[in-house]
Image (cartoon, rainbow, N blue to C red):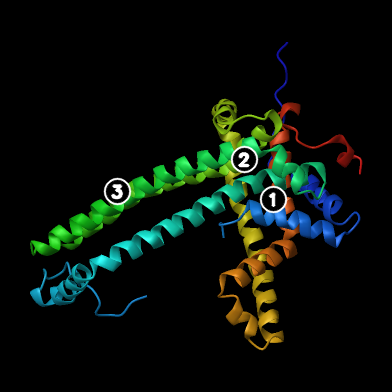
Amino acid sequence: MTPQEPRISVIDPISPALERVKIILFKPFDIGKWFVIGFCAWLAYLGQGGGGGGGGPNFNFGRGFDQRDSQPFHQAKDFVFDNLHWIIPAVIAVAVLIIAIGVLITWLSSRGRFMFLHCVAQNNAEVKVPWRKFRRQANSLFLFRIVVGIISFIFFALFIGVMVFIAIIAARTNAHIGAPAIVGLILLSIIILIPVAIAFALLMKFKMDFVVQIMYLRAYTCTDAWREFWTLLTSNKGRFTLYILFQIVIGLAIGIIAGSVGCLFACLLICFTCGIAGCLMILPPFSIGFGYIMTVLLLPLSVFTRSYSLLYFRQFGPDFDVFIPEIEAA
């Protein structure tokens, strides 16, 4: 007698996820708990959230390349070559700073993923315990995200570079590129870019929703957790496809709610401060603070979405259950 396959539903986890929001955030209501869990959620989702008309060459593919169009280009080129002694160090410094900030955000959010998961799974508002306990897993997740980020950047940079190279060659050779050729290039871009972008998006989605959960349960590295999840994914393609489609629906609904609340809060804040808050939010420290406050205000949505993915994955068996028994009886 073959064992019966578990029933996997995208609808069933909704009600328990809403109940978990009540248990974690409202039974009882504790503002201090909100701010601590909100900090972990803010850390987990950290980082997810021009020019004039005559300043460059005009690539008019309909009539060829007029020599007069190249004058601003040559002026810009002369300026750059005359000031390379300070432009190159400045560009390098800005690039290094941007990369350093991006790496720091990726590292912090990788730690935050396990901290927020710990808070939701254990119904505890803790920062230090999960920060230390899941350091190894978080560092593994961080390295995996960096590698995937580098690969995706190289791919898209090469593709865009090829497209720009074709455009420059066509312009400099005075080649007349008709509408069919332009349409062909656009279609080629769509055919190549969209599937690759979807693949990277699915990779990130499955990693954050399920691979992190396996790492949390087994103390695995990211690659080991991916191997286990890949086996489950390949044998349940239809179920996970339905999960992704339903996540789009949930994401749209939550996006509308979050956007409405965010706009309302920002408008009230700007009105009560006579516009001062609007000016201050442009500055990074105030922008970061505003993001944290918004995360706290929208914490029920974050707890619901994380609980939903955990409850969905639990349907595949007790080996994928992160919740402690006490919270079920709470």
Taking 81 as reference, is 264 left or right? right
Residue mark closest to the camera, 1 vs 3: 3
Residue 197 drawn at (x, y percent): 43, 48
Taking 198 as reference, is 26 left or right? right
The residue shown at (17%, 72%) is: 78
- Could you tell which of marks 2 and 1 lies nearer the N-terminus? 2
Question: Identity of the amino acid at label 1?
Answer: Thr
Residue receiving disc 2: 138
The residue shown at (73%, 34%) is: 314
Q: Is residue 135 visible?
A: yes
- Could you tell which of marks 3 and 2 lies nearer the N-terminus? 2
Residue 252 drawn at (x, y percent): 61, 58
As displayed, is residue 74 above or below residue 323?
below
Q: Residue furthest front?
A: 85
The residue shown at (60%, 78%) is: 280
* Quadrant into which the N terminus falls: top right
- Mark 3 to mark 2 CA distance (whole Å): 30 Å
As displayed, is residue 167 above or below residue 109?
below
Question: Is disc 3 placed on a helix, strand or loop?
Answer: helix
Question: Identity of the amino acid at label 3?
Answer: Leu
Out of 73 and 285, give the one closest to the viewer: 285
- Mark 2 to mark 1 CA distance (whole Å): 20 Å
- Return the mark for residue 305: 1
Question: Is disc 1 placed on a helix, strand or loop?
Answer: helix
Residue receiving disc 3: 158
As displayed, is residue 227 above or below residue 274?
above
